[in-house]
Image: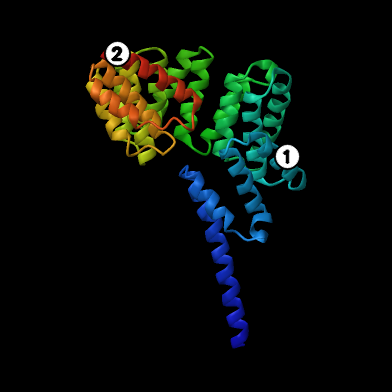
């Protein structure tokens, strides 16, 4: 009996250790620490790597390392073996939509179809899968009809999302109405939402995005201030503060307010977004003609992981050089 208890204890310990390692990889991915995620993944046993959670993590790491085609092939093969696995279907859809953005015109439609099929399967298996629902809403709102975009479906998924996250659902429903030029319905939706959730950071942030699109800068600032005030975590607060800084850049006024917001956002931003915060800060310092601070801030921007940001920083450096003579 004693020997049996020892064996059971060891098995439980091994199971806990395996779960802890898998969870450590997932946590690192959520924190955008890809190097740590890869290092921990490499310590998994062959058995752990070959199990479904390990295979999903392998595919996610391929995605994070921009090996999208390999990730797509990986998840496509997995999905054929595990057609009812939620995570496999979801990440197959994620890899497909990224491939659709990268592929030639001849392959885009094929990947778009793969995306729709995988994401629809995901929400069939897990109707409250918020990431899948949000991705479907975004796709149907922005993709052309020839690629499968359907604004009516976007509204259906937004209402489905509302059943599981009322605040985010209201926000997405209003977004659908705004993008389909039904402003009265959008305003009515937001009015109802604010009646129910007067301190919703999600709702203030969503309305701010529409105000930014309309270049209603003062309204956007007011909404972003409240979005930051009512944010329930540092990530959401950081996003609202970053947008506050961006509004100052694009409007060309309230520079000090923008600098203050971005300074607060910097320690809250995920590692991948910190370069963008510094980029906006540098823009505002240039607006104020504070060349030294602009130069120091530009020097802190890591452009190695983003070609788009690299191009923007080059232009900023030229502007700074011209300003300093």
Where's residue 165, x and y in %?
49, 37
| Image position of 30 (left or right of 132) | left
Give the image quarter of residue 199: top left
Q: Secondary structure at mark 2?
A: loop
Where's residue 43, x and y in %?
57, 58
Choose the circle earlier in sequence order: 2 or 1.
Answer: 1
Residue assigned mark 2: 252
209 w.r.t. 305: above or below? above
Q: Residue farthest to the right?
A: 80
Write the residue at 60% across / 77% down.
Answer: 8
How many numbered marks, from 0 up? 2
How many neighbours does mark 1 have within 10 angstroms: few (below 14), some (14-19), or many (20 or more)? many
Q: Nearer the viewer, residue 285 or 228?
A: 285
Give the image quarter of residue 239: top left
Write the residue at 70% across / 27% down.
Answer: 111
Task: Say which mark, if any, is on residue 175.
Answer: none
Q: Residue farthest to the front?
A: 325
Q: Nearer the viewer, residue 222 or 279?
A: 279
Residue assigned mark 1: 76
**Quarter in which the C terminus is drawn:** top left
Where's residue 134, x and y in %?
55, 32
Residue 173 seen from this side? yes
Q: Nearer the viewer, residue 232 or 40?
A: 40
């Amino acid at each position: 009996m004693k020997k049996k208890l020892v064996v059971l204890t060891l098995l439980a310990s091994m199971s806990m250790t395996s779960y802890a390692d898998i969870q450590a990889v997932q946590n690192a991915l959520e924190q955008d620490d890809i190097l740590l995620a890869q290092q921990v993944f490499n310590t998994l046993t062959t058995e752990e790597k070959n199990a479904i959670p390990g295979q999903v993590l392998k595919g996610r790491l391929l995605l994070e390392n921009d090996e999208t085609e390999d990730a797509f092939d990986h998840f496509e093969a997995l999905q054929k073996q595990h057609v009812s696995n939620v995570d496999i279907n979801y990440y197959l859809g994620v890899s497909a939509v990224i491939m659709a953005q990268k592929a030639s015109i001849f392959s885009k439609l094929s990947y778009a179809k793969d995306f729709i099929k995988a994401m629809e399967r995901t929400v069939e298996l897990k109707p409250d899968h918020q990431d899948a629902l949000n991705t479907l809403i975004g796709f149907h709102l922005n993709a052309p009809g020839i690629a499968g975009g359907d604004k009516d479906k976007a509204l259906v998924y937004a209402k489905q999302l509302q059943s599981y996250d009322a605040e985010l659902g209201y926000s997405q429903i209003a977004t659908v109405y705004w993008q389909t030029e039904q402003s009265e319905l959008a305003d009515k939706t937001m009015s109802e939402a604010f009646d129910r959730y007067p301190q919703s950071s999600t709702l203030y942030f969503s309305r701010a995005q529409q105000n930014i699109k309309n270049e209603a800068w003062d309204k956007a600032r007011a909404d972003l201030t409240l979005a930051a005030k009512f944010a329930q975590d540092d990530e959401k607060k950081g996003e609202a503060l970053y947008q506050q800084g961006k509004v100052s850049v694009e409007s060309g006024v309230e520079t000090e307010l923008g600098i203050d917001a971005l300074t607060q956002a910097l320690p809250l931003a995920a590692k991948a977004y910190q370069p963008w915060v510094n980029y906006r800060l540098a823009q505002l310092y240039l607006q104020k003609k504070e060349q030294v601070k602009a130069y120091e801030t530009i020097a802190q921007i890591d452009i190695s992981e983003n070609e788009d940001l690299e191009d923007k920083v080059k232009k900023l450096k030229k502007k700074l050089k011209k300003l300093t003579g």
